[in-house]
Amino acid sequence: MDYVYGPGRNHLFVPGPVNIPDQVLRAMNRNNEDYRSPAVPALTKTLLEDVKKIFKTTSGTPFLIPTTGTGAWESALTNTLSPGDRIVSFLIGQFSLLWIDQQQRLNFKVDVVESEWGQGANLDVLASKIAEDKAHTIKAICIVHNETATGVTNNLATVRKILDHYQHPALFLVDGVSSICALDFRMDEWGIDVALTGSQKALSLPTGLGIVCASPKALEATKTAKSVRVFFDWNDYLKFYKLGTYWPYTPSIQLLYGLRAALDLIFEEGLDNIIARHTRLGKATRLAVEAWGLKNCTQKEEWYSDTVTAVVIPSYIDSTEIVRQAWKRYNLSLGLGLNKVAGKVFRIGHLGNLNELQLLGCLAGVEMVLKDVGYPVKLGSGVAAASAYLQNSTPLIPSRI
Ligand SMILES: *Cc1c(COP(=O)(O)O)cnc(C)c1O
């Protein structure tokens, strides 16, 4: 069917790209500038200092790379590892699968630790691999913090505990694309060596910036890492950091000003308040799913994601149809089921710049679509469960009350 314009807002509830706040949109509406003038390096300096706060690191070195999450992955791998290096990586959904595919195509020797989709990374297998690896042949652990395809959050503190317990020197590389700036994330405390995200997820910016943060140990590893890297070479950035001009090649001026505005909003709300807001919106979504009589794709509570919920629907309904109808009839954008769970789940993204009533609007839309596709849902049941919880718990912006 051809595209037909629909009035009113599009309700964007895919788990990235997400809504961009008006303040950020306005900040980006500007002309290009000479990035070699003093203004852009001065701005960049504040951005590099401030992005460290969203990773909760003081010792890390950040890189703002004109790329997406996928490029950020590649920069993390090629700057720290050499072809043939043995790494451990967890396959639990589409994003971890794509990262593993990239790792294999870059010629690393990947120990793939696979779990059923809907489960978290199998850290018992990690513990036994680390225990057995007395010779330290494992060079890195790669893990997706929040698997966006299934709504599963992995426990990063446990990964660190395992490495410390066996005093294993493997690098700890983390995809935080759908977690950083939304879920509890502590780069320094958890001893993460490379953490990365993309601008279009919780930071609520347009796509186009890969934000990567490297620990001192990761920077040290670049000195011996033999992977071929050109565009993503951190050393090119470091050279320009030293000169105080910051950019080895042309940055998007608009994205830099957008990032400045986004960070200002983040610090105004407070990072911990943002995390608490995601906890509340995640819980409200799960209560609605339960009220509809549907199952969460995530199999255990300890893995529940507060940024995305994958909802399993009965086999007589194709979830692709739910996503299609939601967009056509209600101007509501939901996430498709990907790969192994295609047709079986649809996803509600509840991350980024978002509040309670926006989420309730989405839940109302989902209820109507469920009814449209023949699922016997009581209209208002999910909205009632979610709103009762939200109304009864600590307000979203305590300082406003
Ligand atoms: C979105 C996403 C990616 C991929 O990012 P792109 O910006 O599309 O390259 C990687 N990992 C996770 C967990 C994601 O959610």
Image (cartoon, rainbow, N blue to C red):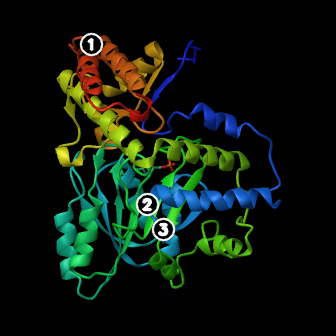
Q: In which quarter of the image is residue 223?
A: bottom right
State which quarter of the image contains the C terminus: top left
Provide residue 349's location: percent of width, then percent of height.
39, 35
Which amino acid does the dot numbered 2 rest on? Lys
Dot 3 falls on a residue whose secondary structure is: loop
Q: Which of the labelled discs sits on residue 141, or is there none?
A: none
Ranked by sequence position, the earlier of labels 2 and 1 is 2
Front residue of this view, candidates 114 and 297: 297
Can you see residue 284? yes
Which residue matches tag 1? 380
Structural distance between the alpha carbons of marks 3 and 1? 46 Å
Residue under label 3: 58
Mark in front: 3 vs 1: 3
- Front-most of 341 and 294? 294
Secondary structure beneath dot 2 equals loop
Q: CB atoms at circles 2 and 3 under 8 Å apart?
A: no
- Front-most of 345 and 301? 301
The residue under the point 41% across, 79% down is 84
Dot in front, 2 or 1: 2
Q: How many labels does the image show?
A: 3
Going by the numbered disc 1, the residue's amino acid type is: Gly
Where 82 sits versus 344, above or below? below
Earlier residue among tags 3 and 1: 3
Residue 22 falls in image quadrant: top right
CB within 8 Å, label 2 to label 1: no
Mark 3 Cα within 10 Å, few/some/many (few <14, many 20+)?
few
Disc 3 residue type (three-letter): Thr
Do tag 3 and tag 1 residues touch (Cβ < 8 Å)? no
| Residues at marks 2 and 1, CA–CA distance in whole angstroms | 40 Å
Characterize the local packing of mark 2: few (<14), some (14-19) or many (20 or more) Cα atoms within 10 angstroms: some
Residue labelled with disc 2: 56
Relative to residue 108, is residue 351 depicted above or below?
above
